[in-house]
Amino acid sequence: MRLLLFNCFLFKLALGCMCCCLSLGSGAKVFYMSYSDYTQHEVNASRMDIVSFLQQEKDRNARIRCIVKNFSVFDFSYIPNEPIMRQESKYLIKELTRFEISGIPTHLAVIGTKGSGKTLTLKYLQSLLNVEGRLDIIYANCREYNTTFKIFAHLLGVQARGASLSELYDRFCQEHPGKTVVLLDEIDLMSAKDKNREILYLLSRSKNPYMVIMLSNNYRFLQDLDMSTKSTLQPVSIYFKSYDAAQIHNILIQRAKQGLHKWDEGELSQIAALTTRKTNSDARVAIKTLFYSVTKDSDDIEKCFEKARKDIVFDMIHDLSDSNLMILQAVTTSKSDFAKEIYQRYRKISLVYNDVPFSYVYFYSNLSCLQSMGLVALIATKVGRTYANRVMLAFEKQVLETVCKLRLNS
């Protein structure tokens, strides 16, 4: 009996550290049950037998199915039939159609915060232009394929064991001899082992008509490119502005029409206002809040919003590289909140994990990336006659501790 109670305690503790999640495809996750949800279900379950509780849950899900007609609209990889039109989209369309006609590329760096619609817009344009057949638009996420070698292997759909980079590149040129647009998402997350991002140099120097579109939350990645790559790539930057409240509301209306049988206009307006005010207009938080509001027993929109916001932060931190996790660890454990002292703390943590620490310049570039993700804030503070940057954590420390236990065993 004691062993059973102890196991139950451990199970509850694990649920308290992280949320259960339901994968809806393409690697996207929707967190479906938190610890507080589970404990409430557990209390209810203790008052009835398994058959009764099972029937209760079936009845509950039947009520949800009366509201939701298409769950896929809540998947972050979902591409709407017609995304909202924005000024940034017009510029992308002009450059893509110009390349379609001339074969002369303008390489682009698409910069914007998380949830600002960069990937969604380009994947939607990919689906339209690939159908016409005049352009070949291909996509790779550099978080998953984080070196030039891995990206080429992915784009070719091969297991590249035993092949050299030059062999992969030659094969890529043979399979894509025509006008090809290469979308490189989250390019700032390429491995430090490939810090020069060799793929940019190869594609921009190719005799084949290749156009490169790089997507990132962090504009500083352009500063890290070596001079030879910059001279041939000469990227033009397009900045995706954060959505305003009206645009967030339109996105929610669109998802509601495509995914729900019924909805409350007032609740959609409330979600849009909360998202704009508290998350820098991250559309992912708005969509997940809508999901929770129609699948949970609670009618409190603010509670659904806070749960969605925390889940997004957990996802973001869990998907960071080990090096960025160590940087965040340094932020939380350094005796000083000034960037240079945090860097020294980061170096010590890296050595503990047998990892080669970044140079200070690359460390600071990663700090800027974390700021663009909304995970830290860099605050210029006057010290004597000069200014120094202080680093403040922008989320709950316990979330980082949970992720570090899972990823770094710390």
Image (spheres, rainbow, N blue to C red):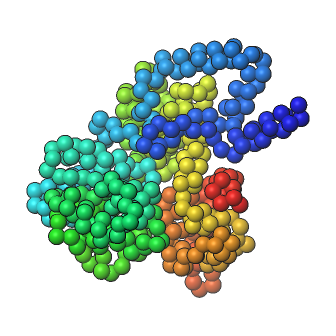
Location of the C terminus (image quadrant): bottom right
**What residue occupies the far front of the structure in this picture?**
162
Task: Name the residue: 74% across, 39% down.
Answer: 11
Q: Position of residue 265 (x, y in %)?
A: 44, 27
Q: Is residue 331 above or below residue 279?
A: below
Q: Position of residue 31 (x, y in %)?
A: 56, 38
Location of the N terminus (image quadrant): top right
Does residue 219 show up?
no
Task: Name the residue: 35% across, 66% down.
Answer: 163
* Quadrant of the rendered image containing residue 208: bottom left
Q: Position of residue 385 (x, y in %)?
A: 59, 86
Q: Nearer the viewer, residue 281 or 221?
A: 221
**What residue occupies the far left of the structure in this picture?**
101
Q: Nearer the viewer, residue 146 or 171?
A: 171
Task: Name the residue: 33% across, 53% down.
Answer: 157
Q: Is residue 286 left or right of residue 328?
A: left
Q: Nearer the viewer, residue 340 or 87?
A: 340
Task: Name the residue: 26% across, 78% down.
Answer: 231
Q: Position of residue 129 (x, y in %)?
A: 20, 46
Q: Is residue 126 above or below residue 349?
A: above
Q: Is residue 294 left or right of residue 383?
A: left
